[in-house]
Amino acid sequence: MKKIIVGFIIGVFATAFLSISALAEDSLLKTGHPDDYTVKKGDTLWDISSTFLNSPWKWPEIWQANPQIENPHLIFPGDLIKLIYTDGQPRITSERTLKLVPGESGGRIDADSKLTPRIRVQQNSDAITTIPLDRINSFLSHSQVVELAELNKAPYMLAGPQKRIVVGSGDTAYARGKFSENLTNYGVYRQGQVFFDPKTKEVLGVHALSVGSVNVQSFKGNIATVGVIRATEEIRVGDRLLLSEDRPMTSTFYPSSPEGDIQGTIIAVEGGVTQVGKFNVVMVNRGEREGIKVGNVLAIYKKGELVIDRVSGGKVALPDERAGLLMVFRTFKKMSLGLVLEADRQLAVGDLTLTP
């Protein structure tokens, strides 16, 4: 009798464990997910994860590195992504495949084909990216958010040759201000939008828009002779010079949840519009001082509408509704830039950004 009871208890616990595992799996894995997927050119890690998972940003939690691949974090077109189970838990892994070069033996091996050893070379630049980099490249390399005081005290373009007020690539020009004797390369920036916190009205920073770069050739007092190295548009008198940033540019972002409870707001959108959609770059009023890091994922919520209660009377605020997801790709002291990766409906400036 005792054995029967013990067996029954073990069975109950086993059933409960399997049920919990099934629930966890059901909440993690997307209904109708495939068992494998072959990576195509143009894919992103976010796209592939969306094929398997309800929450694509959680892929690091179930990613299983393949020790047979030299760098398992790099995924290339042609690689086979597989969903496997280890100790009953879902895991995603990749297999490097060797495909015939199109045109050789019609893309297949037959009796007349001669197999010879060959080295397959793949550049790291061919690896797929986490998110579509073409949407954020200009913000990674040619845009900054700086303190207004920092921009106002920076050196500025004084004049072009023959007293011209605009210059371009290859021109020699003049700038005025306090320069560093040991550093000669400067980015040229034009003041853009000033960002304010919607609640506190604190100045969060000013958008410094890159218009080119210069190299200091000589000094005379606080006047520098500079050569224009690059100009994405005409450089004007009054444009400011900031030291070129010495920081690595990354193409791989590992999604993560913020460490703390983040409650922020979308304060601006790329291009100055008010409506937001998928792959728009947005500015959020939370940054490094609040613990925001590159790769952090934030849920976007539409603020609940205020409606009239026609039964009890008065006005009632409806619950906020989740409407999208963004990933932070660049941080500053008081704010950050994010790319909208999911949008279930039209989003807008003023929508909330919360820890998912």
Image (spheres, helix red, strand yellow):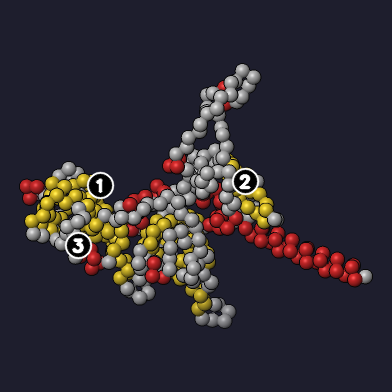
Residue 113 drawn at (x, y percent): 60, 20
Q: Residues within 10 Å of mark 1 (few under 14, many from 20)?
A: few
Looking at this rendering, what residue extends furthest in the right direction? Answer: 1
- Name the element at disc 3: loop
Amino acid identity at mark 3? Ala
Q: Which residue is mark 1?
A: 232
Give whichever of discs 2 and 3 has the lower sequence position. Answer: 2
Kindly identify the residue that appears in the image at 52 percent across and 29 percent down. 118
Give whichever of discs 3 and 1 has the lower sequence position. Answer: 3
Kindly identify the residue that appears in the image at 19 percent across and 56 percent down. 182
Amino acid identity at mark 1? Thr
Task: Please indicate, yes or no, whether residue 242 appears anywhere in the rendered image.
Answer: yes
Task: Please indicate, yes or no, whether residue 34 appears anywhere in the rendered image.
Answer: no
- The answer to whether residue 246 is above or below residue 202 is above
Asked if residue 125 lies left or right of residue 100, the reply is left
Residue 18 drawn at (x, y percent): 74, 61
Q: Residues within 10 Å of mark 3 (few under 14, many from 20)?
A: some
Asked if residue 136 lies left or right of residue 107, the reply is left
Q: CA distance from mark 1 to mark 2?
A: 44 Å
Q: CA distance from mark 3 to mark 1?
A: 20 Å
Q: CA distance from mark 2 to mark 3?
A: 53 Å
Mark toward the viewer: 1 or 2: 2
Q: Which residue is mark 2?
A: 82
Kindly identify the residue that appears in the image at 36 percent across and 53 percent down. 248
Residue 333 drawn at (x, y percent): 35, 67
Q: Residues within 10 Å of mark 2 (few under 14, many from 20)?
A: some
Amino acid identity at mark 2? Lys
Q: Which residue is mark 3?
A: 154
Residue 166 drawn at (x, y percent): 15, 49
- Name the element at disc 1: loop
